[in-house]
Amino acid sequence: MKKESFDKAYQAFASTFTSTQSYFGTDAAPYVLAAFTNNKLADLAGTIVQDINESAPIARMSVSGLVQFGDNCSWTPSGSLSTDDVKLTPCKIWADFDMCYDDLRGVYNGLQNASETGIEPAQAFMNALQEVFLSEYNKNIMDRALYATGGTGTTKYDCVTGIWNQVTTNKVTGSSALTTSNIIAAVEATIQKLSNDVLENAMDNVVVIMNQKMLRIYQSALAASGAAWGFNPAVEKPRTYDGFRIETISKMADNHILVISTDNIALGVGSMGEFEQFQIIDFRRTTGDRKFGISIAGRFDVKVILEAQAAKWYKV
């Protein structure tokens, strides 16, 4: 698709767009919510709670000893019921970025959706920022703990703890990297860490999560063992393990496998207050610098509701 001229795109971006396209609070909601919820992790989450002011509790009930047998005409309660609460407490996350106007030409030429008949050039720059933000967001939320850089947080657990770091009870480790010779055994060993109740009651929701590179190793292992005989290797490759669906998160680390029920993942997004924003700033009108700034900010949290009902494998 043919792009419109850079001069025309530059004019659209450098004048009209930078003076009118700034969103704060509820006006920023479509952009901020899209950044947090239009991604693979949100697609997997069984619960998404929006508009959280301070925190929101998420509870799972467990029961034992409730069932009684024999004849009985009186009300005789038995057993116990308990709830395990976790709290979604959205933490501030932001990205502030600036670029010289002279660098726009190369960026514009690299944008696939800034075309004459497609999306307007200025909006394409904003969408490009969203893609970069989402990539880093997915990396952090799945695979590491976040901390409030530039704020009051000084340790990695001061803000949001990623899903991977929340799973601490059921761990399987290996001394070697995952290869075609050991990845099938690693997946099975991780699944075996889950209780029979999880495997029985949540079978349809339990997923195996890894990155695309590990998936290819797994698929190669199946092909080498002959286990993928039901698939045509030229057109389709298996993305399941013995009935369990395999999902991929691109920013998940190599040699990591996570097995979890999707209804055990809760994502929380803060209310659209004054902190939420998505804007482009023209510094020529303030500092005089020939550059522009792009900013996106919001609040979110993610929780594994019952971490003992998830398991992970990693290389030590």
Image (tube, rainbow, N blue to C red):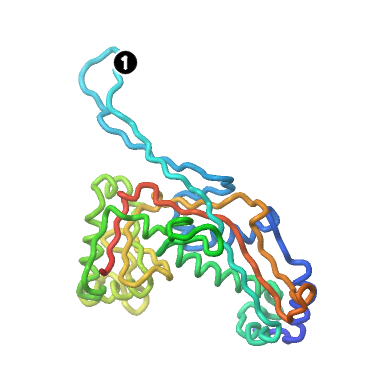
Image height of 228 relative to 264, above or below: below
From the viewer's side, name the closer residue of 295 and 153: 153
Label 1, on which residue? 75
Side (left or right) of 39 relative to 236: right
Left or right relative to 35: residue 306 = left
> Which image quarter holds the N terminus?
bottom right
SS assignment at label 1: loop
Give the tally of numbered discs. 1
Q: Residue at the top extreme?
A: 73
| Between 247 and 41, the one nearer to me in the picture | 41
Name the spot of residue 40 as percent of width and height, x first: 47, 63
Quarter-of-image position of residue 316: bottom left
User: Which residue is at a point 50% across and 70% down the rendered structure image?
Assistant: 135
- In this picture, residue 130 sits left or right of residue 223: right
Q: Amino acid at mark 1?
A: Trp
Q: Alpha-carbon neighbours of circle 1 within 10 Å: few (<14), some, or many (≥20)?
A: few
Residue 141, image x and y in percent? 45, 61
Image position of 81 with respect to 75: above or below = below
Q: Residue at x 62, y 80 (%)?
A: 111
Identify the residue shown where x is 31% and y is 49%: 309
What's the residue at 74%, 73% (across, down)? 282
Residue 20 as seen in the image, left or right of residue 48: right
Residue 247 position within the rendered picture, expressed as x and y whole percent measured from the top left: 38, 64
User: Relative to 52, is 12 above or below?
Assistant: below
In the depicted structure, whether residue 222 falls above or below residue 72: below
Measuring from the top left, give residue 100's x and y in whole percent: 68, 82
Asked which quadrant contains residue 143, the reply is bottom left
173 or 232: nearer the viewer: 173
